């Protein structure tokens, strides 16, 4: 029975990651014609009614006033950076290259969990982190290719996403999910709305509809991931995130004339192997008291694809 549940969880996670990859491919389509932050603004705006329906289910009484204002402020800032960075990176770089860089987030979670969670990291996980970060250098290959704003944005998104994951883990249940969702949404609207004064291009109706598709895809994938974690063990479900590289390779080749080059393939292989090894080590327990990577539901956060762990707290399982 447990094996069947794990298979179901893995299958749901694979489907969720395919939808997330479609979400990111649509971002790339619109990002080729409009400023990336404008795409994020309208996608977020169109996702707001859907998110509000979810938020209304929050059973925890209270207000938007945070119990930990300092940490919530930091979570808001890094959440906005994660979303803005990923949208910009997808509009500038090949999909597979963006994913390869974003896959560094679990490695960074392992590092950040030491000062923020008091996590003990042994030599095996340290070795995996170092090797994984070397894989990022293989993807970036500084000196062999010119690094642009897209690479910087992807790195910033990975760092911000990892920071968000660890902060949410640190806060635990001391903050309402409503607070942790709404403040980044408000910060995102202010930041991306301000960007419209710098560069704005009127969106055609079909393209505006695609922005709505981005909103729907992010939330659908999020709920499928919730079902995946409820069905299977986290150590089985978590590595399914790396399947996005397969979707990225396929979408890149079919729709954007992108070819997975050898350095990106080699670097992605190193990063993914390191990430899976860390998940395996955490799944075994040992020195890992918090299992930060497994518990973090790694995914570059945007308003259209909020943290699955927060959605799960708002949408509890039926008794």
Image: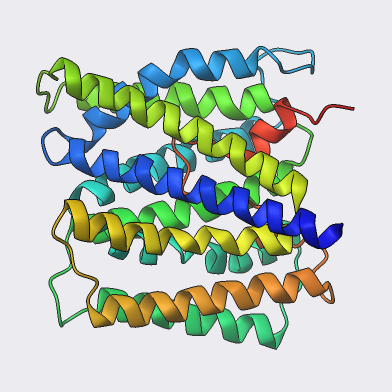
Describe residue 101's horizontal placement relative to residue 296 as left or right: left
Q: How many marks?
A: 0
**188 and 298: which is toward the camera:** 298
- Residue visible at 59% across and 13% down in the picture: 53
Q: Position of residue 43 (x, y in %)?
A: 34, 25
- The chosen color scheme is rainbow
- Residue visible at 70% across and 34% down in the picture: 312
Describe residue 184's horizontal placement relative to residue 285 as left or right: left
Q: Position of residue 154 (x, y in %)?
A: 33, 56
**118 and 280: which is toward the camera:** 280
To which quarter of the image does residue 145 belong?
A: bottom left
Q: Decide: is 264 above or below 41.
A: below
Q: Position of residue 215 (x, y in %)?
A: 40, 27
To which quarter of the image does residue 207 belong?
A: top left
Residue sitting farthest toward the right: 319
Describe residue 84's horizontal placement relative to residue 283 as left or right: left
Quadrant of image for the C terminus: top right
Describe residue 127's horizontal placement relative to residue 282 as left or right: left
- Confirm whether residue 190 shows in the render: yes
Q: Decide: is 256 above or below 119.
A: above
Quadrant of image for the N terminus: bottom right
**179 and 43: which is toward the camera:** 43
To which quarter of the image does residue 284 belong?
A: bottom right
- Confirm whether residue 233 shows in the render: no
Q: Position of residue 265 (x, y in %)?
A: 33, 77
Q: Decide: is 171 above or below 280.
A: above
- Residue visible at 27% across and 27% down in the picture: 210
- Residue visible at 14% across and 32% down in the picture: 34
């Amino acid at each position: 029975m447990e094996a069947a549940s794990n298979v179901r969880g893995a299958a749901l996670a694979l489907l969720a990651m395919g939808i997330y990859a479609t979400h990111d491919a649509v971002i790339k389509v619109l990002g080729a014609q409009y400023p990336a932050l404008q795409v994020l603004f309208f996608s977020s705006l169109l996702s707001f009614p859907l998110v509000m329906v979810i938020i209304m289910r929050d059973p925890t009484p209270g207000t938007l006033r945070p119990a930990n204002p300092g940490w919530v402020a930091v979570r808001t800032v890094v959440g906005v950076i994660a979303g803005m960075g990923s949208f910009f990176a997808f509009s500038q770089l090949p999909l597979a290259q963006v994913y390869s860089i974003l896959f560094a987030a679990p490695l960074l979670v392992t590092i950040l969990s030491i000062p923020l969670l008091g996590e003990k990291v042994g030599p095996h996980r340290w070795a995996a982190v170092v090797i994984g970060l070397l894989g990022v250098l293989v993807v970036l290959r500084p000196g062999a290719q010119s690094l642009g704003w897209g690479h910087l944005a992807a790195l910033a998104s990975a760092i911000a996403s990892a920071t968000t994951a660890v902060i949410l883990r640190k806060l635990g249940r001391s903050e309402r999910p409503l607070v942790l969702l709404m403040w980044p949404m408000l910060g995102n609207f202010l930041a991306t709305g301000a960007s419209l004064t710098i560069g704005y291009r009127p969106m055609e109706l079909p393209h505006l509809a695609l922005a709505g598709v981005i909103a729907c895809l992010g939330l659908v994938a999020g709920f499928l991931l919730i079902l995946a974690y409820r069905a299977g063990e986290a150590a089985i479900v978590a590595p399914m995130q790396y399947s996005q590289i397969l979707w990225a390779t396929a979408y890149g080749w079919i729709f954007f004339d992108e070819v997975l080059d050898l350095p990106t393939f080699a670097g992605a292989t190193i990063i993914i192997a390191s990430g899976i090894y860390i998940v395996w080590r955490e799944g075994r327990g040992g020195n890992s008291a918090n299992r930060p990577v497994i518990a973090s539901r790694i995914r570059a956060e945007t308003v259209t694809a909020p943290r699955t762990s927060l959605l799960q707290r708002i949408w509890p399982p039926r008794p």
